[in-house]
Image: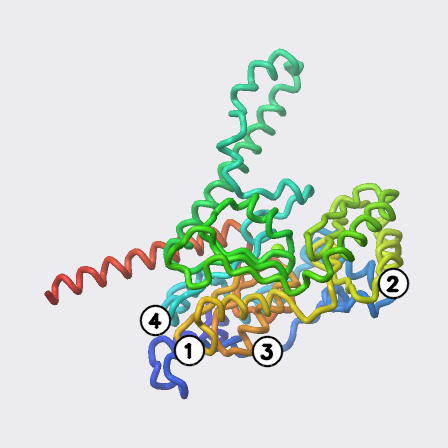
Amino acid sequence: MAQTTVVVPEVGMTAATPTACPCPGSLFPYPPPRAGMAVSRKCLRAAQAELGAGMLSGLVESMRASSPTHARAAAALAAGVDDEHAAWMARHPSALGKFEEIVAASKGKQIVMFLDYDGTLSPIVDDPDAAFMSETVSHSPPLFTLLPAVVFIVPAMHLCSVLTTCEHVINFLIWNEQMRMAVRSVAKHFPTAIVSGRCRDKVFEFVKLAELYYAGSHGMDIKGPAKSSKSKAKGVLFQPASEFLPMIEEVHQRLIEETKHVAGAKVENNKFCVSVHFRCVDEKSWGALAETVKGVMREYPKLRMSQGRMVFEVRPTIKWDKGKALEFLLESLGFADCPNVLPVYIGDDRTDEDAFKVLRRRGQGVGILVSKHPKDTSASFSLQEPAEVMEFLLRLVEWKQLSRARLRLRRQADA
Ligand SMILES: [Mg+2]
């Protein structure tokens, strides 16, 4: 695509002609040049507003904007925003389409992978407790063993739809296991961290890969791999907000109590932060929910509220976020101020922008936003959905394996 080459030519230049770089081997141009006009999207601009400062109407507008399936977003798409989307893709081309240039830029550098969880490795689901990507599938009773009971219990006229549902569930479980295997393969070749807003223990329960780094609670709860004798940061544990634990527990209970009248609202304790999910709340109740949460927050000035995809995030006011977690992990891995590292961060949410901005400031790394729709982002590249993330991870593994095989053959030939 002609427009795409306008966006990322520096990527190719850096990899192919390192001498052209003033600091050889140190920079992966970040982000790509921003050609053309900025995308004008009124509703998404509203979503950027900090919730604490906004009026309630702005808050509800922001809630609407965080819903990718919201009627207004769908209408905008239907109305024809192809040009806007094409312009956005030109500035944030597909990481799959630019794969060769990305890996070429990693020449002589250690790739370190940072992966968000929800919406990146796991599809967004209505029930946040069901977003697993673990071998739960292999521990669950095989669904086909339930089939005889289903046949007797369910009237024949419903059998077809039940079987279809079973098929969807099985496909979902298989897909999750495939993603888990892809992450495991990536971690065999590159240091890999999961960076999530979720509680670290819960993310681990979903993923169940002991060889990874986990940064839960938006990076406020970091732990190194439980198994990896090679890791420089083995067992590293960092909890910069530990003093807030009692307050978080208190506000969690308050939010449960105060929001129980809002049907569909789900309050999740993520240890160092609290999430109030409104994905299953009727839009008519969004204003009431926002007002309730804001009311509780007024009593906790040491906590702040931000908004993610169909979720309010309540967390300590300390200056710590996913970007800081990324820097902390790089430092723990021995890559502080090191030019020979290429961090790759993949995420879908507003909270991931902190990490994209860190990569931009460092002037190194690859930020990849997972989104089907144009969004304001500091990421360089994009992937449409978790399925593309899996494809990208598998290609990375395949590329690394081939690179190693070629190196072995060259050494044998030289010997
Ligand atoms: Mg996410």
Q: Which residue is mark 3?
A: 36
Q: Tell me the quadrant of ligand 1.
A: bottom right
Question: Does residue 400 appear in this view?
Answer: yes
Q: Residue at x 74, y 49 (%)?
A: 277
Question: Where residue 298 is drawn, which disc sits there?
Answer: 2
Compare residues 301 and 98 and report the one nearer the observer: 301
Q: Going by the image, does 123 lie left or right of 135?
A: right
Q: Which mark is residue 107?
A: 4
Which-is-in-front pick, marks 4 and 2?
Answer: 2
Q: Residues within 10 Å of mark 3 (few under 14, many from 20)?
A: few
Amino acid type assigned to the residue bearing label 2 in the image: Arg
Callout 1 touching callout 3 (CB < 8 Å): no
Residue 198 image offset from top left, x and y in percent: 64, 52
Q: Which residue is mark 1?
A: 339
Q: Position of residue 334 (x, y in %)?
A: 44, 70
Camera-nearest label, 3 or 4: 4
Q: Residues within 10 Å of mark 4 (few under 14, many from 20)?
A: some
**Disc nearer the start of the sequence (2/3):** 3
- The amino acid sitting under disc 4 is Lys
Callout 4: SS: loop
Image quadrant for the C terminus?
A: bottom left
